[in-house]
Amino acid sequence: MDHAELEIGRVGEMAAPGGFEKDLYAFDPDLQLKWDRSSQRWTVVQKTRRNRPIGEWDGGSLTEVHDAEYVVFALDEGETPDRRILSHLYDRRGFDREMRQARILRDVKRQKADRQNQVKAQFEPAKENLDRGAHALRKKGFAGASPKFTAPSKGWLSEASE
């Protein structure tokens, strides 16, 4: 194989197209454009800090903080980064937001149903006695019944009613 046939970009790191990294940083400071040597294509990665529990000491938990990179978007081989990627990321962010909101709503509904079932199970053993007690109170005129009403014998506006 002749060395003249090697493509320089396929040997090591490639430089990002001018201005794209600034646009990407303005879109989201946690996103970076990187050249993936193994797949020979550009990738957009997100850097995040993660806490990993490593144990406990003196009643408190110990965690290790480390940076992690996750691939958000991978371009096709030979494709160069341009503003279309920002447009795709913007659309994806809106879709992700809708998916997150739907998941949160679903989780809240499930938690509410779980809580109702928990309360129902908690009061199930006492339900018969509660029903019997409520029936006795209604018979006596306390719970769920209107109290007896009596009007003043001389009328509402008389001095005796005051």
Image: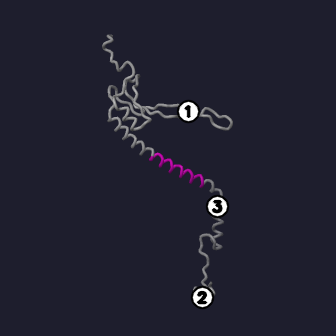
Q: Which residue is mark 3?
A: 128
User: Which residue in the rendered view is the most extreme toward the left?
Assistant: 5
Question: In terms of depth relative to the viewer, which is nearer, 92 or 135?
Answer: 92
Question: In terms of depth relative to the viewer, which is nearer, 48 or 97?
Answer: 48
Answer with mark 2 or mark 3, whichever residue precedes in sequence: 3
Answer with mark 1 or mark 2, whichever residue precedes in sequence: 1
| Colour scheme in use | one colour
Magenta highlight range:
101-119
* Quarter of the image where one finds residue 18: top left
Q: Residue 116 lies in magenta, yes or no?
A: yes
Q: Which mark is residue 105?
A: none
Cα distance, mark 1 to mark 2?
80 Å
The three-letter amino acid code for the residue at tag 3 is Glu
Which percent across, then down, holds residue 142? 63, 72
Q: Which residue is mark 2?
A: 158
The three-letter amino acid code for the residue at tag 1 is Val
In the visual, does 162 lie left or right of 97?
Answer: right
Q: Which residue is mark 1?
A: 65
Q: Are marks 2 and 3 in contact (CB under 8 Å)?
A: no
For the residue labelled by badge 1, is the local secondary structure a helix, a strand or a loop?
strand
Which percent across, then down, holds residue 14? 37, 23
The three-letter amino acid code for the residue at tag 2 is Ser
* Quarter of the image where one finds residue 151: bottom right
Which percent across, then down, holds residue 27? 39, 38
Q: Residue at x 32, y 10 (%)?
A: 2
User: Which residue in the rendered view is the most extreme toward the right?
Assistant: 58
